[in-house]
Amino acid sequence: MQLSSLKALASQPPFPACRLSSGLIACAIATVLVLPAARANEAPPLSLDEALRLATDRSPQIAAQRSAIDSAQEASVSARQLPDPKLFFGVDNLPVTTSDAFSIAHDFMTMRKIGLMQDFVRAEKRDLKGRLAEQVAAREQAMLGDVQLALRRDVAGAWVERCFAQRMAAVVDEQMAEVQLQADAMQAGLASGKTQPAELLAVKVSLQTLLDKRADFDKQAARAKVMLARWLGDTAARPLAPLALPVVPPDRATLADHISHHPHLQSLDHQVQAAQADASLAQASVKPDWSLEFAYAQRGPSFSNMISVQVTIDLPLLRHNRQNRDIASKVALVEQARDLKEDALRQHLSEERAAWVDWDAATARLQRFDDSLLPLSHERTQAALAAYRGGRSDLAPVLQARRDELDVKLQSVQLAADQARAYAQLLYFLPEASR
């Protein structure tokens, strides 16, 4: 390079370089700001397992049940304690007439009194109260497990509804594309006289029906997303991951045995025991409690101060209209708790068996679709396409075969949804190790 050229280059002002540097800096800043937002928008898909875990971690219902457990456990400690003593004070025998009226020092019978009183509840009753409170705490603990299982079932149900509503909407989109192709072909045939106007109108009606079906699936997906937002918040807006159902244990007898130990039934069993403890407490009420009172009385300066001791004993004299009635009432509540537990057991068994019926039916029908119906529908479409390419048929049978194949595919997705719904119901009954 010549010296004059070097001088000319060196004499150029630095503004272009500065503008280039500023542009690079602005671009870099924009990249730094935009990339995190883009990554935030590209949130990872929400799997069913993650949805169940997040719902369990964030559930206010579970937190409320844990608070109920803490409350019941604290109450079980205080139930066995004696009542707090009572402090009393006052004036006895205060004159209200003569010249000594309202004087606390002139009359020898006037006393300023202070004392303590303690109720002594029989140890048997306090023990029964403690047992009752312990059963209530155990019931609340069992209800926590039931709340967790019910939450898993409800979250899984909402997740499944959204997942399969979206999948069925995608199948409907394929159907609409095929119907649109058929409508375009018939529109071309209408000009040449090969297509009747009624046929084209029928295809357009079919397209509008599919649009309505698509809107219904969109509504189902949006509604399921709203339900998921109750438990997951903003996380419910994330796209869903593909569903992979775990292998459900085939040992139905083991599951039936597990139902008898279900947390809901355990809570009802503790409710029965609590009712029995309450009935025993009512029976113990026929044995009287007693209280002790001690008082110190101060009189005028010319008179002696005094102390007094008093024992008070309950007298359950009207047992026929009071204690016996209470006992009968508590015994009836025991029978009620037992009947409710028996009814819940029958309900759980019937719901579990119904879920298995749905699972087995959907599984068998899905197998039939995978083994025969879907392959046969695809073969029919290929045969119609081959006939069309060979000039032995027009386009309408090809499009109809394709629409029928998509109908079969939609039925297959609906069966998969039925199977997933059955699994969501079984989540409420399956043992933890089988989920």
Image (cartoon, grey):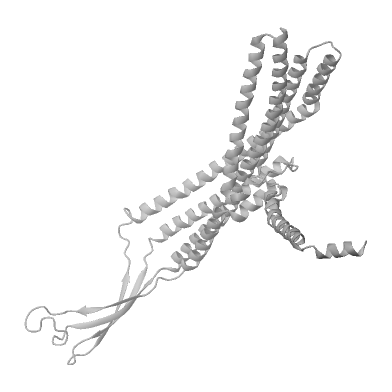
Which residue sits furthest right? 1
Residue 190 horizontal/vertical position (percent): 69, 11
Q: Quadrant of the N terminus?
A: bottom right
Counting from the top left corner in percent of width and height, residue 214 is at: 63, 29
Relative to 356, say whether 175 is above or below: above
Name the residue at the left extreme. 98
Residue 408 x/y as whole percent: 73, 25
Residue 254 image position (x, y, % from top left): 70, 44
167 relative to 336 in the view: left or right = right
Which is more toward the observer, 406 or 245? 406
Q: Residue at x 68, y 43 (%)?
A: 240
- The quadrant in which residue 242 appears is top right
Q: In this orientation, which residue lies closer to the viewer: 258 or 131?
A: 258
Q: Residue pushed farthest bottom?
A: 302
Judge from the rendering whether residue 296 lies leftward or rightward of residue 355; answer left or right: left
In the picture, measured across the screen, residue 167 lies left or right of residue 142, that is right
Which residue is at the front of the view, 172 or 286?
Answer: 172
Which residue: 72% across, 21% down?
181
Query: In this rendering, is residue 335 above or below 87?
Result: above
